[in-house]
Structure formats: C-alpha cells, structure tokens
Amino acid sequence: MASSSLDHTLTLDIPFETEAQASIAMRVLQPDPILRPQDFEVTYSTRGASLVVSVASVDDRVLRVGVSNIIDSIKTIVETADELSLQQ
Amino acid sequence: MVSPSALYTAPDVSEKRFTVDRSSEKYQTTNGRTTGPSAHVLGAGQIDVDRPSDPKLLSDGRTPTPLSILRMELTGLQDDINEFLTERMELAKNKKLKTQSQADEQRIDKEITKLLDGGDDDDDETKN
C-alpha cells in the first residue's frame, strides 16, 4: 500500500499467453530490490494470464525512471520466454 | 492475445490511459524511440551492443510470434509513457522556475520599496 506522499501512480496490465507465463514473470521481477523505497513502491500480481504491475512514486521523474526500468525487465522476460518457446 | 495497457494518476490530473493502436508502426518494432543510445551518440560511431533483437517470426517467416508482438507493443507503450512523463517533468520544472522567478521579483520589489522609503538612510544615521 502506497504511503500518502507517493501520489503519482501507474498501473501496467501485461497480457501473456498463459497464466503460467504471467506467474513466471511476476516471480522473476519480485526479487528486484527497490533502491529508494521512500520514493518509489512497486507491487506485482497476476490476474488470469495478465501480469499487473502497480507503481507509486513521489514524483513524475522518479516514476519515469522506475517504470521504464520495469518495462525493460519485462521485455527481457518476454524475449527469453519467446526464445525458449515457453508455452506452459 | 489482447494488448498491454497502462493507467496513470496524479493529484493534479485526471486519469490518463495508455493503450496500443495495432495499426500504428510505433507498436510494430522492438526499437524504441526513448530507449537506447541517442542519435548523436550513434552518429559519433558508437555501436549499440544492447540493441533489442528483432521480433521472432513464426514458421511462415512473416508473422511475428505472439510474444514478439507483446514485446513490440510494450516498446511502443514504453515510449508513450516516457514521452508523457518527460513532458510532465518539463511542465513541473517550468512551474518551479516561474515560482522562483516570482519570489525573486517580490524580494527585489521589497528591497527597492525599502530604499525609496529611506530605510537605507535611517540605517546610516543609526550607525553614525
């Protein structure tokens, strides 16, 4: 739950092919440490085959850096799954 | 497979939703506009060793795989979000500069008014 000062938020909805892929992506991302937890919070969850990323930040600058990094990581996960042809 | 989407909120704006337009070319590439080295750096001869790989194609050799489509759509969505937030950052910066400038003007006005009222002379008399 975001504290009151983290009032700039962005929620990403990433639809995968299967629930298993979305779950793998969530478990890959979850261990990533947050460098400035007082300025930036992120939670990962799944809804069916979708990965849901909820981000809260102290301002737009921190949000931009954090969200872009998260999307970069998700693209790497998607590319890896694609190369390995993870179908389950 | 449906497309990725995003929803932004902030205290001073109503919700901003980001969606993918599959007919637009910016959602059909793995090379983003707001990620990777700048055109200036590349023009100087730098080689982008982290360049994203091209989309993987199905056996027909033309159609991208569903996960490659997702990666391309994420790339376009990332550009949209980055450009929107960069614009918001510029607005916030300009607002801050304007506020600072107004504060400076008020301070100078106050000092001039004080001088015109003879405040400076009073100080001199006190010292003497």
Image: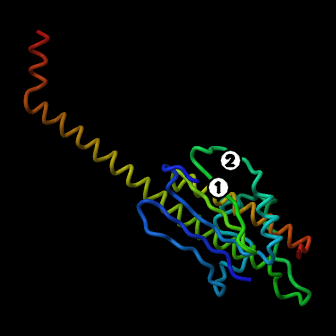
Q: Which mark is residue B2?
A: none
Tell me residue B85's x, y (percent).
53, 62
Marks 1 and 2 belong to one chain: yes
Q: Secondary structure at mark 1?
A: strand
Q: Amino acid at mark 1?
A: Val
For mark 1, name the chain. A
Q: Provide the residue designation for mark 1.
A: A42
* Nearer-N-terminus badge (1/2): 2
Query: If the image is split into quadrants, where does the N terminus of chain B sit?
Result: bottom right
Whether A24 is drawn above or below A7: the answer is below
Indicate the colouring scheme: rainbow
Calculate the distance from the C-alpha at mark 1 to the C-alpha at mark 2: 8 Å
Tell me residue B11's x, y (percent).
43, 59
The tally of labels here is: 2
Q: Provide the residue designation for mark 2.
A: A34
Residue at left offset 57%, top offset 52%: A62
The reply to whether callout 1 and callout 2 are in contact (CB within 8 Å) is yes
- Callout 1 environment at 10 Å: few (<14), some (14 to 19), or many (20+)? many
**In this orientation, which residue lies closer to the viewer: B76 or A27?**
A27
Whether B49 is drawn above or below B57: the answer is above
Q: Amino acid at mark 2?
A: Ile
For mark 2, name the chain. A
Q: Secondary structure at mark 2?
A: loop
Residue at left offset 9%, top offset 20%: B122
Tell me residue B76's x, y (percent).
65, 73
Whether A49 is drawn above or below B82: the answer is below
State left or right for residue B39 relative to residue B111: right
Q: Quadrant of residue B18?
A: bottom right
